Image (tube, helix red, strand yellow):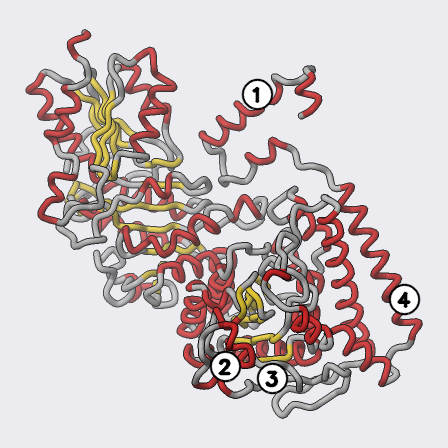
Amino acid sequence: MSVKSTAARSSRGGAKRRGGAGRKPELVQLLTPEGERVEHSEYSIDLTPEELRGLYRDMVFTRRFDGEAVTLQRQGELGLWASLLGQEAAQIGSGRATRPDDYVFPTYREHGVAWTRGVDPLNLLGMFRGVNNGGWDPNLNNFHLYTIVIGSQALHATGYAMGVAKDGADSAVIAYFGDGASSQGDVAEAFTFAAVYNAPVVFFCQNNQWAISEPTERQTRVPIYQRAAGFGFPGVRVDGNDVLAVLAVTRAALEHARSGEGPMLVEAFTYRMGAHTTSDDATRYRLDEETEEWAAKDPIARLKAYLANEGLADETFFAEVEAESDALAKRVREGVRAMPNPEPMAIFDNIYADGHALVDEERAQFAAYQASFEGSEEGAAR
Amino acid sequence: MSTATAPASAPAARKPATMAQALRQALHDALADDASVHVLGEDVGTLGGVFRITDGLTKEFGPDRVTDTPLAEAGILGTAVGMAMYGLRPVVEMQFDAFAYPAIEQLISHVARMRNRTRGAMPLPITIRIPYGGGIGGVEHHSDSSEAYYLHTPGLHVVTPATVADAYGLLRASIASDDPVVFLEPKRLYWSKADWSADAPQGVPPLGRAVVRRAGRSATLITYGPSLPVCLEAAEAGRQEGWDLEVVDLRSLVPFDDETVCDSVRRTGRAVVVHESSGFGGAGAEIAARITERCFHHLAAPVLRVAGFDIPYPPPMLERYHLPGVDRVLDAVARLQWEAN
């Protein structure tokens, strides 16, 4: 296992590492970077060839539309995009572990999880194009809107899970967040509430090593998964670039929650191959060697090698997936460009349940103002 | 305190009750009427809350409905968001005004915006009860008037009762609302009494309707929450000066009842806004602006404000100088350019 532990980079983080962080943390892995199946004492998985190919397809599709979104941003079609490049296994593996009746609380980078929940990628891009603040109905797929504020959704997920527990329902909730968010008070408070109320929630931390420009060492002195112990629930670190291990561990964590055992923290050890967002320049703070090292642990390449080596998929399959992903990208590209601009009057909708005198008054004033331009040159431009 | 001119249907068996008792009754009745209502906060369980507003509720409805929480305000409100998403109707108690600030990020970025950003798919019917205001000799951080922070946030209702009957009615209306409500309880009026019947409470008033507590012709005192008794006392005292002062109790800062306020000011031609919180950028500034925009040609004098000074809340021994009192209110009334008449 060649994953570099956080301890190895401690010199740059500044803090001298002590205590439990000194030794290399346990990392659940079922598929090596070379594509070899390995066993783990606690976590196992047995998937059909069809299911394995499905995971591959999910990851390729996700990477493809994610890359298309980056391109669309560069072409001025999107205002911003937060690429998930490199985190496909962490997202597809965990997303495919959820059941339809589970509820998912994502950050703004969970495009792969959204894919597994059946949210159309076009809806995700609409938010980054600026036509809305989240274009899907969260209740349709039990997939909440992207939360931009760091870590807040961990509390929402915990509260939702407390509601589930009150009902005695056997569904679970999963909260996504990153290594940076692990420093947020909201996340710590979510751990506290989930623990004392024994809420059926899985905290899924994608430790992608960087919070914009800050390495994980700036957030924590112990491996993130070890924090769970202090709150009184289990934590586990999984190879976040191993879709099989992520699927197995997340399934177990969700089952743990569903069966009344309470919360669990999963730290998916992965890497953000791209910049934080299209507005970021990662060359200012990290070295190419590090990125290259992680490129050798690519989540898609290792599953492809496994499928090919085991004779579970052939070149025809891989070519088909490639062609289908190109078709998806084309649909996304054309869909974004064809997206209608929102109606200006819509900004006054859904502020309050019923009529609200102030909003109604401003709506009427704005409508009259807009109407005053009708027929004029300015009106044509509006 | 007097609520003599408040419209009331004079129910049978009225007897003296405190605002605290009326609030408790409102929570009780909401819990009894709607299984989705859940009360949560610090010490709301066995203790019954530090002000005893939830006294006995956990015993009657169980700790699953009336729940002690960890001491983390963002956590309380943030989990309430998740509960509301699940379909519950949380009623959150923040222990004191200044202790609610850790929850402000959840309030502004999530509670207030969720209906809008989900385009109506996910309303958050959360009531956030906050004891507020001074006058009880509280130590530091126990006397803030924080309404301006909340009323500046679109998506929230901001409600504050000033009478026993309204404490019940407005809290029931707030809990029934499908929008989030910041429900500010004037803590120095918790023990104010009025004849009121828990068995036949006055009707539930709609949110966003002000009420004229005292009719008058000379000038309008516009106030809310803890300053209402001050204004009513000032109005009585003002009679000796020859002023017949009208007193408007806003009851709700958001939605704001322009109609009742402007009707009054157009009749009297003079207005003073009275509140405890600091004047600069406060509710009074907004109210004065709205009156000026709508009633300018009816005004005989500029709209004046009597507010807390623009200072951090002073130590308890000095708070009486900071809080608007009868004399400061009457002093403002005296400056309403009477010589022009």
According to the picture, the residue beneath numbered tag 4 turns out to be: A320
Compare residues A54 and B12 and report the one nearer the observer: A54
Amino acid at the residue labelled 2: Pro
Earlier-in-chain disc, 2 versus 3? 3
Earlier-in-chain disc, 4 versus 1? 4
Task: Please report contact status of discs 4 and 3: CB closer than 8 Å, yes or no.
Answer: no
Compare residues B314 and B92 and report the one nearer the observer: B314
Q: Are marks 4 and 2 on the same chain?
A: yes
Tell me which chain the residue with mark 2 is part of: A
Tell me which chain the residue with mark 1 is part of: A
Judged from the image, the secondary structure of the residue bearing numbered disc 4 is helix
Instruction: Please identify the quarter of the rendering in which residue B229 is found.
Output: top left
Q: Is residue A8 left or right of residue A136?
A: left
According to the picture, the residue beneath numbered tag 3 turns out to be: A27
Q: Position of residue B191 (x, y in %)?
A: 16, 48
Amino acid at the residue labelled 3: Leu
Label 4 to label 3, Cα distance in Å? 33 Å
Q: Quadrant of the C terminus of chain A?
A: top right
Amino acid at the residue labelled 4: Glu
